[in-house]
Amino acid sequence: MHKIAIIGLGKGGTVVYQTLKTTKNVSILGVADIDPKASGALLAKRDGVFFTTDFTALLALPGVDIFIEATGRSEVREKLLALKPAGAIVMDGKAAELMLTILDEKRQLIEIKNIKGELDAILNSVQEGIAVAGMDGTVKYVNPSFVKISGISAKDRIGENTFRSSPDGALARCLRTRQPVFGRRSVIGGTDIEVVSNAAPILAGDKGEMVGAVAVFQPLTDVMRLMDQLQRQSRLLERLSVKFGEVTSAKYSFDDVLGADPALRQVVEVARKIADTNSTVLVMGESGTGKELIAHAIHNTSSRRSFPFIRVNCAAIPETLLESEFFGHEKGAFTGATESKMGKFELANRGTIFLDEIGDMPHQLQGKLLRVLQEREIERVGGTRPKPVDVRVIAATNRDLAKLIAAGTFREDLYYRLKVIELTIPPLRRRKEDIPLLVENALAKFNRLLGKRIRGFSAEALAELRRYDWPGNLRELENVVERAVVTTDGDTITAAKLGPLVDLPKRDLSLRDTEIMTFEEMERRLIELAVAKHGHNLEGKKQAAAALGISLATLYNKLRRYGLGDTK
């Protein structure tokens, strides 16, 4: 008997609860949700199952061996993993839903296998005569009723060619026309027995290729029902593959794109406007700027959000497997292809495919991707017929595609097909005013994950972070904040603590460099220069204000605005 506790009784948790409560060898000992009026909570109370709004209370229930976390919140999962009894398992809610779906599909497949086992018994027991032949007309099977009706033994009929023995029969006609035959009167070859026959093609494989025909001397109702059920096997396998693809979903929305930088907000505004279209999008930007986050947000805002979001890193898949990964392959298409496989585009059908690092895609595959974008169809490796796909493509790269085109490593026609909508995300060094907000968000995240209570960064530490040019962009900033949180014992991260964590450059505060900058950046640098020259004490700041031609109060206001040291 498996003893279960469920945390989170929203839509997913409620489905898991309803399914497990009727499952043999499963006992639900308790459930938890912060909302006592959640639908699953009301069901549990009605069923007399222990309910609490504090999920940690479930940890005290004796005998629980599986905790199903259905809130989707990482902090809940981490706390469960940290506090769960030894030997207990923590299972993700989506994984539990998928497990139940797979078990149901497996049950149906077992039923179909049982039907296959019953088919011979049925064919041998029905009163109608039945004959089966291959495409060349060779009879492969006759049932006992065929022998009884015709007086011809199975040994004498099997192996004969129906085109010679019964050229006018329903079986021969069906094989010639490849169409079903109904109510055809004919004489069984070698006899004077007239019968009314129905015949139908036998289709096999994913492509529905005709491999023979079956004829029945009476209405085909029972046999056709069984044949239809057998054909369901391939459809069930296809549906199961699609369900695995649907587990992949976008995690972020536009609310996760932080910052007030005008260039960034313009990117977000355009992305919001085009989210619910089917236009192809090319996201440009340096590594670590958040290109994938934008792709997630576009998908989650579109009408495709209920369907798969499939991510493909074009640089991470071995070149020899790229085509198979993208488009799938048929059984026997190459050595080791023992089963047919759906590609990423098929898995993303009706959803979005995100092609990351598109600039690293091999040249020979670019032409096939172009065809997909133009024709909206794919062809599996080893396949002979195209398959239509309804997929929205979002591509991203940190490389200069114009240079790659000039070098002959990237197709110009593919470039223009991809950049129907082009979004360029600014690097962090060009939006340093957003650093305090980004740091605050990252600090809250790592406080929660690491169980720390750090209140913030000192003014000097923030000034150091803004002075750095962040070649790794947001990813590097998050890494620095995480390392600072891990290594800080107090409640404030200081500039001294940052020193070993990031290679902050010694800024030459002279104005000899010729880079073009905004007036705000120029003002900030002048203030840095003046305070560095005259000192950070009160007297030094008075001299700095005088040198800049501003009042001491104005200098303090600007120091606060730019986060340049203390303002005492």
Image: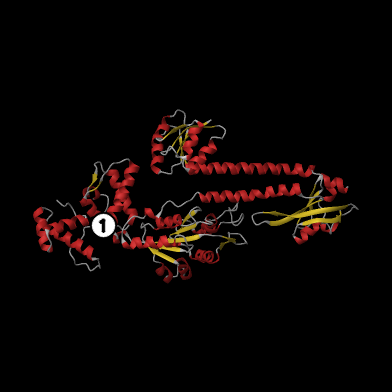
The x and y percentages for residue 235 are 62, 51
Name the colouring of the figure. Answer: secondary structure
The x and y percentages for residue 496 are 21, 48
The tally of labels here is 1
The x and y percentages for residue 551 are 12, 60
Residue with the most extreme right position = 192
Q: Secondary structure at mark 1?
A: loop
Residue with the most extreme top position = 62
Looking at the image, which is closer to me, 102 or 398? 102
Quadrant housing residue 162: bottom right
Residue with the most extreme bottom position = 406
Looking at the image, which is closer to me, 366 or 150? 150
Left or right of 114 in this view: 430: left
Q: Amino acid at mark 1?
A: Tyr
Looking at the image, which is closer to me, 14 or 472? 14
Res. 355 in view: yes
Residue drawn 12% across the image and 64% down it: 549
Q: Is residue 298 above or below residue 79?
A: below
Res. 3 in view: no
Residue drawn 59% across the image and 44% down it: 105
Residue drawn 72% across the image and 48% down it: 225
The x and y percentages for residue 130 are 80, 49
Q: Is residue 161 above or below residue 416?
A: above
Left or right of 466 in this view: 212: right
Say few, some or many: other residues with alpha carbon within 10 Å of mark 1 (under 14 / 14 to 19 / 20 or more): some
The residue that mark 1 highlights is 468
